[in-house]
């Protein structure tokens, strides 16, 4: 059996879809299934993927559909194709559906139409199927139980007992161009006397902004590349995360969080997550207010508030995301 994966990542697309599909591909590779990982991405993406052992093909960025078709057709026809991209247009979907026995699309269900055998959204939200499906035969699954956490994250040893006092903060918004939000967080956090604030910086951050952030406080610590997400969440008492999948990583790691929407399509899924867990949702980063960040951090200083969030996390995440996906689409390992 041969399985294709197709994704795209970088400064403007973010890293999420690359990371998620790489987790699934690596899992299948360890089960001796033939995997081909087809991607668009910059040198940072290529470096990230180099640590995985499955076979990869790097396409030029913004490749035309005609050129992509000529390349991929020479590679044979897969039994399954997994596709996840910020902008997977219908022509691209049609092509991979035509060469695959089954096309599986993972997405947050943006404002577009899908043509696939399976459509999986790894976040809980309300959506009208008739508005997004080109084919009524598409099987659609919407639930955060499908989120593909990596094994390193699942094998955590963090205690469920929270510290009474918040001393360590994590700011982790993802790998995209979210510099304005990072700056506002840094300014807001200067109002507190936390022992340590760790910022996970995007790979392509502006060098002047990076210097500005580092000069703000001696308590600020910066990390450019993350290979062990478990470690950074393990040491954090509170995290400021994106409205995408980073909030689910906070949940599985039992870390109370504040949400900032870094993409417009995150409004629905961030709001749903906030209602279910009690985590504050600050809205889209374009309208983010420093005063609002400060206000929500002060509220979360209450141990009882953070304890309620932890108890609710159990309802929104599953430790079996990859196997849940494979079961739904009929891949036996």
Image (tube, rainbow, N blue to C red):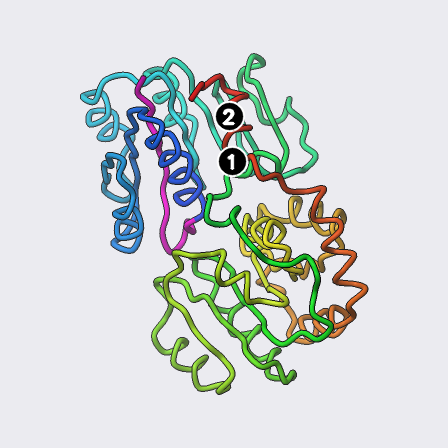
Observer able to see residue 110: no
Q: Is residue 258 left or right of residue 65?
A: right
- Across and down, in percent, residue 164 comes to 73, 72
| On screen, residue 69 above or below 292 | above
- Across and down, in percent, residue 321 comes to 54, 35
| On screen, residue 103 above or below 252 | above
Q: Quadrant of the N terminus?
A: top left
Q: CA distance from mark 1 to mark 2?
A: 10 Å
| On screen, residue 65 above or below 159 | above
In this rendering, the label closer to the viewer, 1 or 2: 1
Sequence-earlier tag: 1 or 2: 1
Q: Secondary structure at mark 2?
A: loop
Residue 114, label in figure:
2
Span colored in magenta: 1-15
Q: Are marks 1 and 2 in contact (CB under 8 Å)?
A: yes
The quarter of the picture where residue 19 lies is top left
């Amino acid at each position: 059996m041969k399985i294709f994966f197709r994704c795209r990542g970088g400064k403007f697309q973010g890293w999420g879809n690359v990371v998620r599909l790489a987790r699934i591909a690596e899992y299948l590779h360890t089960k001796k299934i033939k995997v081909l990982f087809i991607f668009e991405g910059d040198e940072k993406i290529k470096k990230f993927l180099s640590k995985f052992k499955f076979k990869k093909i790097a396409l030029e960025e913004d490749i035309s559909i005609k050129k992509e078709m000529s390349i991929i057709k020479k590679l044979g026809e897969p039994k399954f194709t997994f596709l996840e991209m910020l902008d997977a247009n219908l022509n691209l979907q049609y092509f991979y559906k035509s060469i695959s026995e089954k096309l599986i699309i993972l997405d947050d269900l943006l404002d577009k139409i899908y043509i696939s055998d399976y459509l999986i959204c790894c976040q809980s939200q309300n959506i009208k199927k008739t508005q997004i499906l080109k084919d009524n035969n598409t099987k659609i699954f919407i639930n955060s139980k499908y989120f593909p956490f990596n094994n390193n994250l699942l094998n955590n040893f963090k205690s469920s007992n929270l510290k009474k006092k918040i001393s360590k903060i994590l700011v982790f918004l993802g790998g995209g161009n979210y510099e304005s939000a990072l700056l506002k967080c840094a300014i807001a956090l200067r109002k507190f006397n936390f022992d340590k604030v760790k910022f996970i910086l995007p790979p392509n951050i502006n060098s002047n902004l990076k210097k500005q952030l580092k000069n703000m406080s001696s308590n600020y610590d910066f990390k450019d590349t993350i290979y062990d997400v478990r470690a950074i969440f393990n040491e954090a008492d509170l995290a400021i995360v994106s409205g995408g999948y980073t909030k689910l990583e906070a949940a599985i790691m039992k870390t109370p969080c504040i949400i900032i929407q870094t993409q417009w399509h995150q409004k629905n899924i961030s709001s749903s997550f906030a209602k279910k867990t009690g985590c504050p949702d600050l809205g889209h980063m374009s309208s983010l207010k420093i005063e609002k960040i400060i206000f929500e951090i002060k509220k979360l200083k209450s141990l009882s508030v953070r304890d309620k969030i932890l108890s609710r996390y159990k309802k929104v995440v599953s430790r079996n995301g990859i196997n849940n996906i494979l079961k739904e689409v009929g891949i036996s390992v």
